[in-house]
């Protein structure tokens, strides 16, 4: 099975990214052929400082390697190192009805949040379709918010195939249901665009400060507390097995502890969980040449994989006169 995912290097990685996508991808490496790339062209829709994007891209590469992307098992590259994706983007645009993009939730959400509605934001799903279709993957592991983008990809692929024959394989998305949407510190979906994230690699003090800001209901210390829709519980449960979850539920129901206690416990859970990854990250931060070599090697492999398909597309569309 070929599994593919992209992540925008547009900010610090957070726990929503980890449970919604990165963890599944790391696990998928065991049994699948995995393709992972840093979507820096997509990041241009929100990052307009060139130096910053360069920094963020290298940092994202370091973070991913630290979290377990294994270059021996995965093809790992930066989107812009395989330019064929832009060629395919243009070809696919010809098979993308305006209505399909007008219905995209992600576009509407971003505009509602005040991001300038320009063409790249609007055509974002077409570039994402190109990212996917260029490598003929079977599965795209995503968070819930990205399902529609994979559906759009399938629609575009079907339209292209109807015109030119069975060129594209139709990908399936995979959502881990119980972690479909990780809540942020305000209870909305955790997202770097909403400024409500708990970042994986923040310094301890900064991370703790964020955790202390998690919105909770005001209940006197001694009284029992509701865990079901408590933001602290809903994040903590991601780090706990069933027994651990039951134990925490009991602490809520017993009363005698405030949300402050649960927040400290959550901090411990998060800090311990990511300890080995922090150490590995330190190594890559001190060996950036090694990181660049890994990315170059990945881009070479990704390109080799994409070339036969792109040649075929040039041929059927008549681009290669
Ligand atoms: P952000 O919303 O912070 O900008 P991205 O859009 O870069 O995050 O998402 C990268 C990956 O992480 C995607 O697969 C996305 O579905 C997943 N993801 C992001 N936020 C969450 C969340 N709160 N819960 C689950 N998955 C998420
Ligand atoms: N749009 C995705 C996100 O914001 C990132 C992405 C770009 C992607 N291209 C992709 C994800 C291809 C999966 C497959 O999370």
Image: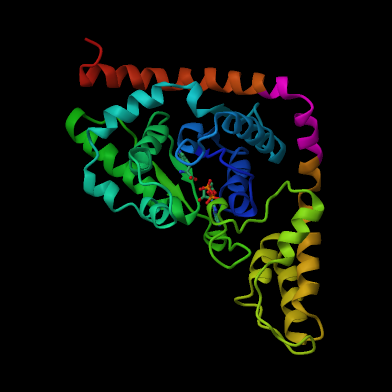
Q: Nearer the viewer, residue 140 or 152?
A: 152
Q: Nearer the viewer, residue 119 or 85?
A: 119
Q: Is residue 55 visible?
A: yes
Q: On the rendered structure, is 320 left or right of 306?
A: left
Residue 253, given in percent of the width and then of the height, sits at 73, 85
Specify the quadrant that holds the C terminus. top left
Q: On the rendered structure, is 42 left or right of 287?
A: left
How many discs appear?
A: 0
Q: On the rendered structure, is 177 left or right of 201?
A: left
Residue 247 lies, with reference to residue 134, above or below; the image says: below
* Residue 140 magenta: no
* Residue 286 magenta: yes
Q: Which region is colored magenta? A: 279-291
Residue 224, given in percent of the width and then of the height, sits at 73, 88
Q: Please give the name of the residue rendered at 59% of the width and 56% of the height, measured from the top-left corner.
A: 195
Q: Is residue 35 visible?
A: no
Q: Nearer the viewer, residue 251 or 292?
A: 292
Quarter of the image holding residue 145?
bottom left
Q: On the rendered structure, is 64 left or right of 151?
A: right
Q: Nearer the viewer, residue 183 or 217?
A: 217
Quarter of the image holding residue 156?
top left
């Amino acid at each position: 099975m070929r599994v593919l995912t992209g992540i925008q290097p547009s900010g610090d990685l957070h726990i929503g990214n980890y449970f919604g996508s990165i963890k599944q991808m790391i696990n998928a490496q065991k049994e699948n052929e995995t393709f992972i790339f840093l979507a820096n062209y997509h990041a241009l829709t929100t990052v307009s400082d060139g130096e910053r994007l360069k920094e963020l891209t290298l940092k994202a590469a370091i973070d991913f390697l630290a979290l377990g992307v294994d270059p021996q098992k995965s093809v790992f590259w930066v989107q812009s190192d395989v330019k064929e994706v832009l060629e395919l983007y243009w070809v696919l645009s010809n098979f993308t009805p305006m209505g399909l993009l007008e219905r995209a939730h992600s576009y509407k959400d971003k505009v509602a949040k005040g991001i300038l509605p320009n063409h790249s934001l609007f055509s974002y799903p077409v570039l994402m379709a190109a990212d996917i279709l260029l490598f003929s993957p079977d599965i795209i592991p995503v968070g819930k918010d990205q399902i529609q983008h994979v559906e759009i990809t399938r629609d575009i692929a079907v339209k292209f195939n109807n015109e030119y024959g069975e060129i594209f394989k139709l990908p399936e998305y995979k959502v881990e249901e119980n972690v479909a949407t990780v809540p942020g510190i305000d209870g909305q979906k955790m997202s770097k665009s909403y400024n409500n994230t708990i970042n994986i690699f923040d310094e301890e003090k900064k991370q703790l400060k964020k955790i202390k800001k998690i919105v909770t209901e005001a209940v006197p210390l001694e009284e029992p507390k509701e865990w079901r829709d408590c933001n602290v519980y809903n994040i903590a449960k991601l780090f706990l097995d069933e027994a651990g979850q039951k134990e925490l539920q009991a602490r809520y129901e017993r009363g005698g502890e405030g949300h402050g206690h649960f927040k400290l416990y959550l901090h411990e859970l998060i800090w311990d969980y990511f300890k080995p990854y922090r150490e590995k990250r330190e190594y890559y931060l001190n060996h950036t040449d090694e990181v660049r070599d890994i990315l170059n090697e990945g881009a070479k492999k990704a390109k080799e994989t994409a070339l036969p398909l792109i040649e075929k597309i040039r041929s059927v569309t008549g681009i290669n006169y």
